[in-house]
Image: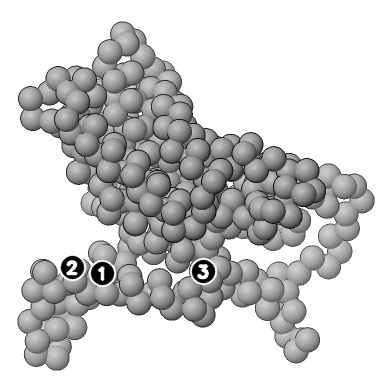
Amino acid sequence: MFYRENGQFKTTYQADQQIFPIAQDKWGVLLIIAFAFVGVPFLVDEYLFRAILIPFVILSLAALGVNILVGYCGQISLGSGAFMAVGAYMAYNAYVRVEGMPLIAALLCGGLSATLVGIFFGIPSLRVKGLYLAVATLAAQFFCDWAFLRISWFTNNSSSGSVSVANLELMGWQIDTPLNKYLFCLSMLVVFGVLAKNMVRSAIGREWMAIRDMDVAAAVIGIRPMYAKLSAFAVSSFIVGVAGAMWGFIHLGSWEPAAFSVDRSFQLLFMVIIGGMGSIMGSFFGAAFIVVLPIFLNQFLPVFGAAVGVEISTAGIAHAEFMIFGALIVWFLIVEPHGLAKLWSIGKQKLRLWPFPH
């Protein structure tokens, strides 16, 4: 009853093509963003910032980048963890080797470095697709793991192989508390989310979706597959690289190559599948699901085991997490390939028609 566009007339093309054509959507999103900036800091303690909110915001940004490549352009990638690692290590080198390097500039340097690596490993997409492309991007993961582990330049000749950053600030604003880290990461997510949403609605976004649906037909109507595919790899790798730099700088503070292993690549791909491929909103749904589910299982399974008289070990909880992830991925691929975002869209459509049966 309250979610309808009755009386909302569009008199210009600009009004008809805006991001949120229904006023309720626009004001709802603005209220959520305002609550995330203003309300959450008063309701959340330090543990929730560190364990849930900061990882959720950064992984949402990474899933956003993966979704552009996998969901919008249809290019399967298993090297997202490698692009995150490139962003983290190159941002670290820019930050420690260049005197007075601003934090934002260092993060963007990491993203640009990931862009170059993503374009290089995206070249096979011009000739192969599907499983073969997945294997080609997986090679990027193994190569980057080897490079950051064996080449000491990337770690600034650290004897332990790990790197760390401290005393982060942005124009005098010290990013040292969980609240400040959360606000900084949330600001970056909002900026990149708006840019990504406008990009997928633009001409280049339509080219990506044409390549995803049928690349041969797209080439026939004048779309350049090389430009479309490599630009998708470039944009995706840039966003993932910035997210990787934020993961290392903001969330971890100190890290080693194992922090960006192949498990991270699969985790990001699971976020896109569960959240919804080809949906900006699906990136947020998938990240929230992947971040919250392990914490929920760690709290729920021991209580459930005690209630039924069965002791569940820590290893059992970890195995249950993998089994549930696998079952959910299979279920979504069979029942709802477009993930949680599609279920959300169906719910909104039913609200627009309720209480009428048609």
Residue 345 left/right relative to 233: right
Three-letter code, disc 3: Gly
The first of marks 3 and 2 along the sequence is: 2
Q: Residue at x 19, y 83 (%)?
A: 304
Q: Which residue is mark 1?
A: 322
Residue occupied by mark 3: 339
Residue 136 x %, y %? 40, 47
Q: In the rendered structure, which amino acid carries the disc numbered 1?
A: Phe
Rounded to the nearest whole Å, what is the CA distance between mark 1 and mark 3? 18 Å
Amino acid at pointer 2: Ala
Residue 96: % across, % down = 26, 16
| Residue visible at 51% across and 69% down in the picture | 339
> Label 2, on which residue?
318
Residue at x 88% of width, y 58% of height? 9
Pick the residue in front: 324 or 217: 217
Q: How is the image coloured?
A: one colour
Label 3 Cα neighbours within 10 Å, binned few <14 / some 14-19 / many ≥20: many
The residue depicted at 19 percent of the width and 25 percent of the height is 151
- Closest to the observer: 162 or 31? 162
Q: Give left or right: position of 219 versus 89.
A: right
- The answer to whether residue 277 of the structure is visible from this angle is yes
Label 3: which secondary element: helix
Along the line of sight, which residue is nearer the eye, 4 or 329? 329
How far is the residue under mark 1 from the one under mark 2?
7 Å
- Of the two numbered discs 1 and 3 on the same chain, state the one appearing first in sequence: 1
Q: Residue furthest right?
A: 11
**Marks 2 and 1: in contact by CB < 8 Å?**
yes
> How far apart in space, not on screen, are marks 3 and 2 (Cα)?
24 Å
Q: Quadrant of residue 140?
A: top left
Contact check, label 3 and label 2, Cβ < 8 Å: no
